Amino acid sequence: MEPNAALSLRNVSKRFPGVLAVDDVSLDLLPGEIHALVGENGAGKSTLSAIAAGEMHADSGDVVTSGTVGLVHQHFELVGRLRVWQNVMLGREPRRGWRIDVQAACERVAELAKRNGLEIDPNAFVDTLPVGVQQRVELLRELDRDPAVLLLDEPTAALAPAEIASFFATIVALAERGTAIMIVTHKLQEVLDYATRVTVVRHGRVVERMANAGGSVDAIARAMVGGELPQVASRELVTQMPLLAIRNVSAGSGERTIRNCSFEVATGEIVGIAGVEGNGQTTLADAIAGMIDCDGSIEPRIPMGIIPQDRQREALVLNWSLVDNAILGRQHSPGVRRGITIDRARAASDARWIVEHFDVRAASVDVPIRTLSGGNQQKLVVGRALIGDPRFILAYNPTRGIDVGAAALVQSRLIQARNRGAGIVLISFELDEIFALADRILVMYRGEIVGNFARDVADRAAIGRLMAGSQ
Amino acid sequence: MIRVRRALSGPAGAILLVLVLMSLAMIAAGTSPVEGFSALLYGALGGRNQIGETLVATSALLFPALGIALAFRGGLFNIGAEGQLLIGALFAGGVGAQLHVPGPIGIVLLLCLGAIGGGLWGAIAGWMKAQFGANEIIATLMLNFVAAYLALDLVSGPLKGPLAAGAETAWLDPTYWLPTLLPHTRLSIGLLVAIAIAFVLHWVFTRTVFGYDLRAAGEAPEAARRSGVNIARLTWLSLAISGAISGVGGATIVTGELHRFNTQLSPGYGFIGIAVALVGDLQPLWICVAAFGFGILEAGGLAMQASAQVPKDAIHVIEGIIILVLAARRYVAARGVGDIE
């Protein structure tokens, strides 16, 4: 045990029904370090963070801290209908007599934001803000308590590349001022770029501790999966026939407006839509999915498999079992529906199929899906969208928050669907993912499609410039 | 220790807490708890007549509780069961007093009319929510008053029985009375209808597409909408069915118990039904058990008042306490659930 550690975990274990989530883990966080905790989905990272933050009690072992511990959650814990300053100050509002001193609160939030290089309007309502900005609110709330230790659970999963760079600038500055930082992430390049030490967990145990210098993405990934990485499936030549035509589609309002979007999707084609988050992608996805009214035409209307952007709100009923969730969205289709009843046996077999083919780690298919890690929830959502071989698939950040092995699996399944002849619209904030999967790349900027490149002539630099709004 | 705490945080703990609070209430009223409880239990279960009265109350509470549970499972806070029950009873009583068809057909017809009346009343609230975004709590609550005054107006005027002294319809012809279930008591086969509905609802919730959509809309409205559930349709339909179940309940009170309609026929069954539904954890079969428990309190309370000098109002205090205990239990349970990896 390091004598000057800001946080020490000693032989910590935690058991959940059917699974030993954390198994005899010891870990020190030192002031000023950025410590990366990596591992597969369900390896116990989030549980470990929750124990370190004092949000959950370990069954055995000790947690020793030298000060406040802040935890920024993967799934934000914000009150959407309150303003930014209200969220940041929640429970610690400055007072003037019996009233809240709004002005002092706003100034304090603005000052805190400025000091940490986080641009934000303290008076904005949180639910009007893009995900990247919402995360700044989460971060500010923790920073306001001046933590000695800051734990970040998948902090960049929802961020655009430019936001990631500025996010890490903030984090590095914090570390330089002596905060001990632990970051839980699946993005190994970020680990290499910013972390000082790396701890790898697998099945709840620490399997590798490495200093970051001289590491490689491959070495970390192999330690995570305990062997070689799965290969992403290769693309095959597929005859392309017109499948879906999107013509002059305009919809939405304010920052979410899209204008005159037109493109076509062919069978056996993945159309990748690149862009920084908040440029109309959600509106476009909702228009294609038929969830909002729009001008223009999207034809023909065909059944589709959908991977929505916000799995917890739009794709899952968190209190339900995997079995019940496995048929959500298909409960009205023949095969699942039998007259007025639901074919429960079919639901159970679908759930088992998804669990098997998408490597969903769960104690059983009958546990509530909220007990699964975010990555495993996402795998179920992806598996459900691909079940029954749909001819058209709408995928919105399909690998958000899932580990390298699982991401390779999901990407392989999408490519296999394409090879089989499905048309796919892939909206992703990860340019790497777009380049790995897409046959054609469109660029979205401020609600318009500003670029259209075939795979072989797509130029990364040009696309990057278009995403940023320059020619 | 942990096992004890776990047991206490369950329904058993809630019941234990309720018993303790009831004892305190009895001591405060100057009666020994032993005496009070024995009076209560004797009054509720001490003989054929007592059991009959307990089951009459059970049946009257069960219908609205089941209707409420259906709406609640869909995320709709229908607190208008009282009005829906009353309109159902009014339809049955109003038509029943003038009816000239063979007996069995008449009985089925009157129960159906109860469903139509209550269903209509629920559907009005559902339509207001689906069409204009009206808050269903306010809509259903306010429709209770509309129902009460509408019924009063009609039975004071056009529907008033020629020989009736107060606001009542004429008597139903005895061929339209529900058969008695327990001889020499007021208990009719309405109780069996209620239990049958509970089993049907259990099947609807666990097996049917409608039940699946309903539960999805209640648990995660946005996910439900995106899965293809027509939320507007589901809203008015579930409130209509919810009202229809309460309405049948009203019709069974008219045809099985009072044999005519009067405006005083429900001492708040539609409101106590909310507690019954919550105590039964919104699960139809548990609601049957809960309704029996509340039936004991309702029927036993009167006896307790007579023999142990504990005011009958104490029973309503206790019912309030039960709701509070259960609400607290749900709150604790919701808070105690941790998301895990």
Image (tube, coloured by chain):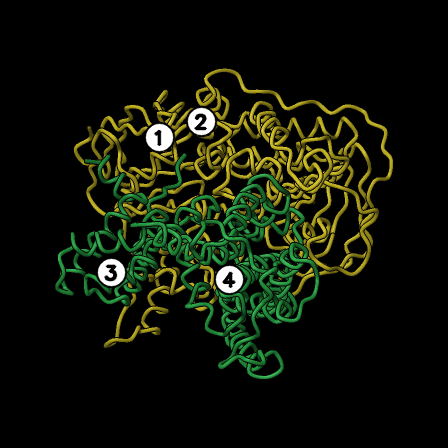
Chain colours: A yellow, B green
Can residue B232 be seen? Answer: no
- Image quadrant assignment for residue B139: bottom right
Give the CA separation, mark 2 to mark 3: 51 Å
Q: Is residue A150 left or right of residue A417?
A: left
Q: Position of residue A14 (x, y in %)?
A: 30, 29
| Residue at figure coordinates x 21%, y 46% from the top left | A67
Q: Position of residue A151 (x, y in %)?
A: 34, 42
Pointer 3 chain:
B
Of the numbered discs 1 and 2, the one sitting upstream in the chain is: 1
Return the mark for residue A16.
1
- Residue holding disc 2: A363
Give the CA separation, mark 3 to mark 1: 48 Å
Whether residues under marks 3 and 4 lie with C-beta atoms below 8 angstroms apart, the answer is no
- Residue holding disc 4: B253
Q: Position of residue A160 (x, y in %)?
A: 55, 47
Q: Secondary structure at mark 2?
A: loop
Q: Please, is residue A349 above or below residue B328 in the view?
A: above
Q: Position of residue A186 (x, y in %)?
A: 48, 33
Identify which residue, A65 or B6, lies in the foreground.
Answer: B6
Return the mark for residue B304.
3
Identify which residue, B171 or B144, lies in the foreground.
Answer: B171
Q: Residues within 10 Å of mark 1 (few under 14, many from 20)?
A: few
Of the numbered discs 3 and 4, the one sitting upstream in the chain is: 4
| Residue at figure coordinates x 77%, y 23% from the top left | A236
Which kind of residue does numbered mark 2 sit on?
Answer: Ala
Which of discs 3 and 1 lies nearer the camera? The answer is: 3
